[in-house]
Amino acid sequence: MTTPGARRRTPAPPREDVLAAAMEMIAERGLEKLTMAALGREVGMSSGHLLYYFHSKDELLLRTLEWSEGRLGAERGRLLTRASASVRERVEAYVDLYVPEGHRDPHWTLWLEVWNRSQNADDDARDRQAAIEGAWHRDLVALVAEGMSRGEFRAVDPDRFAARLRALLDGFSIHVAIGLRGTDRAQVLGHVREFLHDSLLADS
């Protein structure tokens, strides 16, 4: 029973709600506006309460990235297991999901910040980042191997090819995300389609 005048405690929102709010703030206001105090006001928590749960802004950003990647991973899984699509179509869907939507794409904005901060990250944080990268890599390796087995793709080393394609995608994606002049999403997708045609598609 609450005594008269006692202050009721407002329960903290579920952690996923906090991560979703952080991602929404990045999308709407930019990463520079995402402070513990601003996020706390958004979700009705004090910055101290947020630090209790996340310990540091670096941890908040990494957890937000993991949450966002979890959603992307589910979407990627749906796209890549479509029985009605050819392997080539599914590789193109993978590329389309990978490349940023445009300048200041919130997911890529967050990724770039986490990468930048990882210079001083501990082993646990590095392992978690590697797990995210590994999921994208394994899916692409599996697609390339399937395309070879179906005769859609030339014989290549799937692991080496996936590593090179993802390096190409990363480079182009950074250009799109930072808004480098002369590089937009449509141009990037065109370059990648040309690369896939020249290096992977089976000779007709």
Image: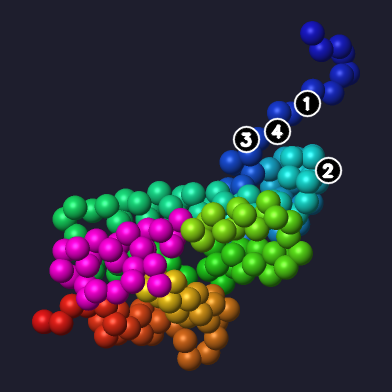
> x%, y% of residue 22?
64, 52
Cα–Cα gap, marks 2 and 1: 15 Å
Please name the amino acid that badge 1 sits on. Answer: Arg
In the rendered structure, find residue 14 and report the number of the disc placed on it.
3
In the rendered structure, find residue 48 and report the number of the disc placed on it.
2
Residue under label 4:
12
Cα–Cα gap, marks 2 and 3: 16 Å
Q: Residue at x 48, y 76 (%)?
A: 167
Estimate how packed mark 3 is, as few (under 14), some (14 to 19) or many (20 or more) residues with alpha carbons within 10 Å. few
> x%, y% of residue 38?
75, 53
- Tell me which numbered mark, 1 or 3, is placed earlier along the sequence: 1
Q: For numbered disc 4, what is the local secondary structure?
A: loop
Magenta segment, principal secondary structure? Answer: helix
Q: For numbered disc 2, what is the local secondary structure?
A: helix
Please name the amino acid that badge 2 sits on. Answer: Gly
Q: Residue at x 25, y 82 (%)?
A: 197
> x%, y% of residue 151?
15, 69
- Magenta residue span: 135-160
In the rendered structure, find residue 9 and report the number of the disc placed on it.
1
Cα–Cα gap, marks 2 and 4: 12 Å
Please name the amino acid that badge 4 sits on. Answer: Ala
Q: Nearer the viewer, mark 2 or mark 1?
A: 2
- Tell me which numbered mark, 2 or 4, is placed earlier along the sequence: 4
Q: Quadrant of residue 165?
A: bottom left
Please name the amino acid that badge 3 sits on. Answer: Pro
Q: Quadrant of residue 116?
A: bottom right
Asked if the magenta segment contains residue 80, the reply would be: no
